[in-house]
């Protein structure tokens, strides 16, 4: 009998190393259970509940992401998507994910508010055997099934090269308005931008945290203009913040400044139209990944196919020359 128990314990230990099994490892420990996401697949005849945890709905980009997910999911009759809005509150988003775990959703999608505070609860879901699709913003570590998003370092570099080669080839002082501190795109877009302007005479004289929101950026820009009246341009890490900075400059009578953003949403109030109408000099396309997330969920749950750990979406620089064409093309999808 003792020999049999020892054999069972040994087998359980081996299994725990390779998969979420036997219940020997804490869900929130440092260990990550290897996962075969196709084990969640029940084929085309089953019904699947997907939980989508959104960082906030204050940003137009995130509203569009949810809309893209909803629109794509409507084409998959087996899917029911439940949405949760964390409203920029890390603890609320943790609670939202815990709720999805309790409901035993078949798959979790999440766009984290900040990386570190959401890492453990995402790991908990993953270690429970729930496939996890991380969108746009990352978590720490690799306890998820797949990450879908554009390369934020490359996007920042693209923006920096536009400043260096086109907008300010002779150099000059500029300010940067960053996204929420603690969100991975904020750090990555700054890193890429600094790489893009390297070797130029462009000087970033100040950086402010605009929290990804237009109203916050407008307030911060008002203060930046008073502290740095000799700047020539603004690099904002998303289009709403670029528009907020533009409004502050207009109110201050600074009609000589140039503004560049990121997102390029193909909607009437988005960055592409802001470029067409002359408020922004350029924007950089940052796809939401919503349609790709639903397609990935279909591969995992219905088609029983493996998916890549990282799925990088394409970007492009949008200026006055191509804005109309890009807007029309993106809305044909």
Image (cartoon, rainbow, N blue to C red):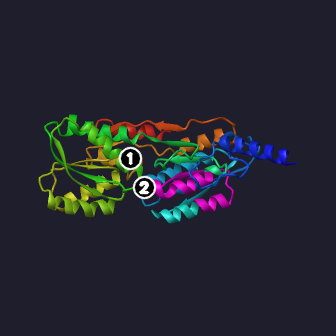
Residue 200 visible in the picture: yes
Magenta stretch: includes residue 114: yes
Residue 40 visible in the picture: no
Q: Is residue 55 above or below residue 41?
A: below
Question: Which percent across, then down, holds residue 172?
Answer: 14, 44
Which residue lies at the image location 47% right of the left edge and 64% below the top edge? 89
Residue labelled with disc 1: 263
In front of the other: 285 or 98: 98
Instruction: Identify the mark at residue 60; answer none if there is no mark.
Output: 2
Find out whether the residues at labels 1 and 2 contact each other: C-beta distance under 8 Å.
yes
Question: Which percent across, then down, holds residue 179?
Answer: 35, 54
Start-end of magenta stretch: 97-125
Report whether 206 appears left or right of 23.
left
* Distance from Cα at disc 1 to Cα at disc 2: 10 Å
Question: Which percent across, then down, holds residue 235?
Answer: 26, 48
Which residue lies at the image location 65% right of the left edge and 58% below the top edge? 101
Instruction: Identify the mark at residue 34; answer none if there is no mark.
Output: none
In front of the other: 299 or 25: 25
Question: Which percent across, then down, holds residue 74?
Answer: 62, 48
Report whether 261 appears left or right of 124.
left
In terms of sequence position, does the residue under pointer 1 or pointer 2 come before the other?
2
Which residue lies at the image location 36% right of the left edge and 50% below the top edge? 186
């Amino acid at each position: 009998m003792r020999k049999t128990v020892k054999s069972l314990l040994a087998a359980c230990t081996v299994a725990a190393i390779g998969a979420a099994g036997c219940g020997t490892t804490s869900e929130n420990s440092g260990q990550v259970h290897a996962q075969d996401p196709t084990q969640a697949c029940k084929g085309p005849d089953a019904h699947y509940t997907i939980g989508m945890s959104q960082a906030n709905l204050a940003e137009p980009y995130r509203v569009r992401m949810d809309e893209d997910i909803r629109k794509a999911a409507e084409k998959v009759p087996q899917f029911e998507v439940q949405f949760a809005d964390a409203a920029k509150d890390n603890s609320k988003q943790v609670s939202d994910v815990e709720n999805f775990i309790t409901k035993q959703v078949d798959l979790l999608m999440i766009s984290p508010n900040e990386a570190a505070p959401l890492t453990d609860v995402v790991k908990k879901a993953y270690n429970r055997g729930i496939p996890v699709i991380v969108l746009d913003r990352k978590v720490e570590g690799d306890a998820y099934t797949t990450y879908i998003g554009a390369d934020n370092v490359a996007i920042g570099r693209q923006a920096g090269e536009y400043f260096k080669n086109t907008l300010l080839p002779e150099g000059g002082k500029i300010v940067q308005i960053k996204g929420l501190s603690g969100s991975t795109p904020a750090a990555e877009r700054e890193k890429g931008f600094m790489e893009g302007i390297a070797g130029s005479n462009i000087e970033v004289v100040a950086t402010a945290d605009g929290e990804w929101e237009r109203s916050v950026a407008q307030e911060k820009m008002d203060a930046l203009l008073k502290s740095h009246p000799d700047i020539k341009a603004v690099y904002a890490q998303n289009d709403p913040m670029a528009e907020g900075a533009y409004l502050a400059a207009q109110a201050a009578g600074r009609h000589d400044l140039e503004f560049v953003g990121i997102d390029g949403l193909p909607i009437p109030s988005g960055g592409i139209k802001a470029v067409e109408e002359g408020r922004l000099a350029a924007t950089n396309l940052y796809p939401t990944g919503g349609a790709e997330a639903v397609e990935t969920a279909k591969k995992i749950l219905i088609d029983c196919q493996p998916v890549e750990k990282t799925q990088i979406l394409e970007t492009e620089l949008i200026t006055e020359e191509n804005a109309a064409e890009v807007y029309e093309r993106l809305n044909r999808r």
